[in-house]
Amino acid sequence: MFKRSHRNIPFFEYKKTLSLSLPVIIAQAGQIMVGLVDNMMIGHLGRNELAAASFTTTLFSLVVIFGMGFSFALTPIVGQRMAERNYTDIGKSLKNGLLANVLMGLGLSALVLLLSFLIPYMNQPHGIINSSRNFLLLLMLSVLPMQVFYGFKQFFEGIGNTKISMIVMLLANILNTIGNYLFMYGKFGCPELGLYGAAVGTIISRVFMAIIPFICLLRMKAFRRYLVGFTKARCSFDGVKRLYVLGIPLGGQMVMEASAFGLCTVMIGWINEVSLAAHQIAISLSTIGFMVYQGIGAATTIRVSHLIGEKNVAKVKTVKTVSIQIMFAYCLLIVILFIGGRNILPHMFTSDQDVISLASSMLILCGIFQLSDGAQIIIAGVLRGFADVKMPAVITFLAYFVIALPFSYYCAFTLEIGAVGMWYGFPVGLTIAYFLYYLRYKRLLRKSLA
């Protein structure tokens, strides 16, 4: 899959990428751990509760992922301004970014409301419909504060500070777990809400995530040079428009990849509750790899956007190679974890032997597609650094919706392999996405160096 890497790359190149990526990875790890804990706690409420949570969080995550992808538009803009040391314009870009994210958050909240009315028509098991619908309506309240946080997160990353977001997310994750415990089980005088208590914990933590970055911006000395542009400049129509022009394809690209997994969840729900619960376990564990690759991809975007601002395009190739090598080292460990621990890991979620057996088979496929998943995330990060958004969105649609999803359906239902067959399309789609992203990267690099 990869050509021979550059030799004699200085160690400080690895140090730069690692110093940017590790806080993102730690923050993602904290978020993933909360998701795993949520699923473990919900799983012990019962099979139906776990299935309802699986279906609902799949639908909701598509909305959240689109919002997160949309917010990515701010990173290359801020990153290039940072390389130019245009601090006033960075503050103005943050203000435009927050307005754009608030407007998007309102729109996404309306979309969640619409999805809640469509749940009864999605051919899911009858026993989870009401629970899924109510759970989704509660989660809707967390969309707007989450979108505000994403705006700040991309600003912080654009200026090369990935630690603030890490700290905020880790504290929010602790708050989320405490909220779950209090409201799911009715502790310390709180109402016992069961499944819905998990949604209450999410709302509390995401409101916290929206408030703390504002306090950091206004109170911390490191951010004072951006306050002039942030407080005095007016939001500009052109600035917000540019964020939408970049952000909508980025959000679409991310949600298409995620929705391919989401649509697989919907189709697995056509089989039975056991398949849906097993899929939730395997897909939850798969995020252990994703969060690492996403962190390295975020660092790659930051570094490439700074190089573009410095007019140092020739160094982009070195940054890409360093990121791929770091990703590959992580990938080996994660493959060993999934394949070697496939018969052990599902026990953390459930004691249902049918669910455990099926999840174990899915984890083998999960290990197989790790390399392709990591590679395509890194190259996508390079393309974001170039602020290249439209062609990657087209590539994502082709790889996942034209090729991977039909292949998954064919394996699961036409060949009658069942729920495991739905997972066969994942390595196919991810590998095709990588090669097409790579061709796009090579073309952009040649064009920029010409």
Image: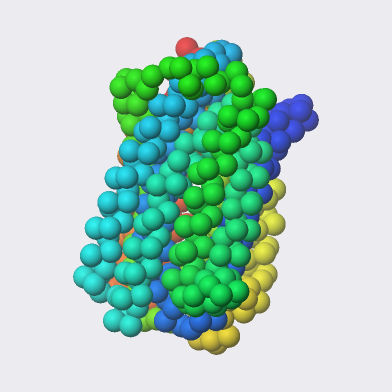
In the rendered structure, the answer to whether residue 117 lies left or right of residue 424 reads left
- The answer to whether residue 54 of the structure is visible from this angle is yes
The spot of residue 149 in percent (x, y) is 50, 42
Query: Residue at 36% across / 61% down in the picture?
Result: 59
* Left or right of residue 425, residue 129 in this image: left
Q: Residue at point 27% right, 68% down?
A: 119
The colour scheme is: rainbow
- Which residue sits furthest front? 189
Q: Number of numbered discs present?
A: 0
The answer to whether 36 is drawn above or below residue 296 in the figure is: below
Q: Residue at x 57, y 60 (%)?
A: 176
Which quadrant is the N terminus positioned in? Answer: top right
Q: Quarter-wise, where is residue 294 in the image?
A: top right
Residue 306 percent coordinates (x, y)? 57, 22
Q: Is residue 367 above or below residue 76?
A: below
For residue 224, above or below residue 296:
above
Residue occupying the point 43% across, 33% down: 98
For residue 398, say whether it is visible.
no
**Depth order, front residue of 30/113:** 113
Residue 49 in the image: state x and y as whole percent.
Answer: 44, 78
- Residue 120 vs residue 15, the one in the foreground: 120
Q: Where is residue 370 in the image (x, y as percent from the top left)?
A: 56, 55
